[in-house]
Image: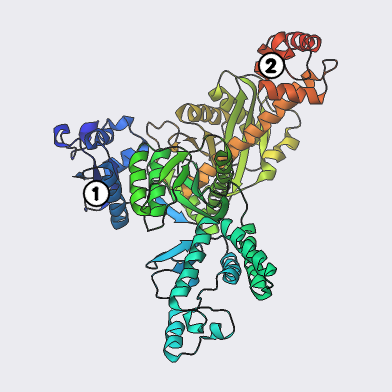
Amino acid sequence: MSDALSYRPKTGEIPTSPGVYRFRDETGRVLYVGKANNLRARLANYFAPLSSLHERTRRMVTTAASVEWTVVGTEVEALQLEWTWINEFDPPFNVKFKDDKSYPYLAVTLADEAPRALVTRTTGIRGARYFGPYPKVWAVHETIELMLKAFPIRTCNNANYKRAMQSGKPCFGGQIGRCFGPCSGLVSIEEHRVIVNAFVSFMGSQDRKLINQLTAEMKDATVSQNYEVAAKRRDQVRALNAVLEKSAVVLRDSVDIDLFAIDQDELAAAVQLFIVRGGRIRGVRGWMVDKELDLTTSDLIDSIMLTAYGSGAVPPREIVVPELPDDAAALETWLAGVGKRKVRLVAAQRGEKAALLATATQNAKHALMLYKTRRSSDFVARSKALEDIQEALEMSSAPLRMECYDVSHLSGTNIVASMVVFEDGLPRTDEYRRFSIPESTDDTDSIYRTLTRRLAYLVPDGEVTPEVEADATVKRKKFRYQPNLLIVDGGQPQVAAAARALRESGVTGIQLCGIAKRLEEIWLPDSDYPVILPRNSDALFLIQRIRDEAHRFAIMHQRSRRKRDITSVLGEVPGLGPARVKVLLQHFGSVVRLREAPAEAIAEVRGIGPVLAEAIHRHLRA
């Protein structure tokens, strides 16, 4: 099927050199920009048989009408050119970064004659040195107030500074003692520059050496009875200590790193950046990434690095990432060019940096969850999502009530199923239901059994099937509303099983579909091809959230049953209390492993002796 791509170049025409390629549509619009260390090898992946391509990649190459490339000398040059073209053409299939807010920075305008400290939300001031970002604007102002006590530098704007210098009269800030620039007459331009350099040095390194030096000067001044200088040094030490205390100590004082954490699913990724200077978290920044094509973590890290440092931000000497990208060496070279010094990419595996990465990852997980929840709960987005689902599935009306089903089990045991309900795009937790399945051959059979039981409550009053108990009238209230749309977690096999249950029930007026997790495809009954919803659409986000909620609910029920079952079984063993049961489960990890373990292995568990281990082994094998 690769012959369908008429614009495919001959293999021999594509160079094997590093370079950047662009896919264009019929109008000439750039759809996607990518880089490669070997253009021929990379482009060959796009021109593989269409059936073997990821669905979204297939959509991109079939939408495109041409491909072109530019050869460069090195992979670093390819990285730079890729970044330039992504910013210039804004290709729809490249990742989209959505910063969740505009962060405040503390900036020092080093290019000015008399540099000043200011609060800003932009990073384009020529020659300025930035510190942050800070989570709140008041945190920047508070830091400046404290730092000015130790390093009195200019804070007035350029207009006031020029007027004061021309008139010889200090600016208003200088008159009330809040601005200490050269216009105040207290310091010269050269002396002010020395103080500014000390300000920048301390903010950049958070080094306690300066505090120790000022403390020593305070003691010397006290001994020499120069109490005015001693009081000044005391105030400076207090201010600098207060600045350090504003940041939590997480690593050694000498550690300066930027740490990136990522949590992602098939459609989006949340990025959390922890800026650590002097072993302290000096700033936190987060943003979302919408993914149009299926990206590896390595590709995503490439894009994150370009976004974080492509606008002129200076990288530290060490950057911690979840895993090293394939082109780590090229990225380090590019980052070294940006920062004018050697930069090292590190994948933290253990130790204090790995612990901090775990904390940042938890923040990223929460940010991704919050992003998806807000998107699917917004009224306008929900309305648009329901309309898009109606159109995509060719329904006669919008699916105002949707039910989603998922199955969970542990190696074929403890089989349970979940039913979650969304009305008007919002969850109805009071109508969630759980199903226990005594026996089943596989997931498709479990889906069939679950839907057969659920649909039995939708038949007319006089047609209750034998599978429904005599008190069906009472139980019917639990399932009193008929859904517009039934969703099952799975692809064609699961949808076929659900369709069989729906057909045998005799219930009509319900649309059925399944969502396959790997490619996020929507499958309809008796369809050879899936329905592909746009990756960034509100419709796919809503269906994805329903599916994830059904999966979470099923897992929670399965785990609670497993814990209850094994606790009750082990509780029958004499001498085995709740504390020892907990230790056993933590040691073996699952009931299956505990049941298969020999008595000698059980005896090695803390608090379990040979006699008790033999009793446990005998009881579980009985």
Q: Quadrant of the C terminus?
A: top right
The one nearer the camera, 552 or 22, is 22
Give coordinates of residue 244: x percent, y percent.
61, 58
Q: Residue furthest front?
A: 224
Instruction: Name the residue beneath numbered marker 1.
Output: 25
The one nearer the camera, 106 or 20, is 106
Would residue 72 be seen by someone viewing this image from the given angle?
yes
Give coordinates of residue 241: x percent, y percent.
64, 61
Residue drawn where x is 26% and y is 47% of the image = 77
Earlier-in-chain disc, 2 versus 1: 1
The one nearer the camera, 215 or 442, is 215
Q: Quadrant of the N terminus?
A: top left
Residue drawn where x is 67% and y is 36% of the image = 433
Tell me how far mark 2 sits from mark 1, CA to CA. 59 Å
Task: Classify residue 394 by image quadrant.
Answer: top left
Hey, what amino acid is under mark 1?
Asp
Q: Residue furthest right?
A: 574
Mark 1, secondary structure of its residue: loop
367, above or below 434, in the image? below
Instruction: Name the residue beneath numbered marker 2.
Output: 594
Residue drawn where x is 64% and y is 36% of the image = 553
In this image, 498 relative to 324: left or right?
right
In this image, 233 relative to 607: left or right?
left
The one nearer the camera, 183 or 566, is 183
Q: Residues within 10 Å of mark 1 (few under 14, many from 20)?
A: some
In this image, 546 relative to 30: left or right?
right
Give coordinates of residue 583: x percent, y percent.
74, 24
Q: How is the image coloured?
A: rainbow
28, above or below 223, in the image? above
Give coordinates of residue 348: x percent, y percent.
51, 38
> Do the residues bearing badges 2 and 1 touch, measured as CB atoms within 8 Å?
no
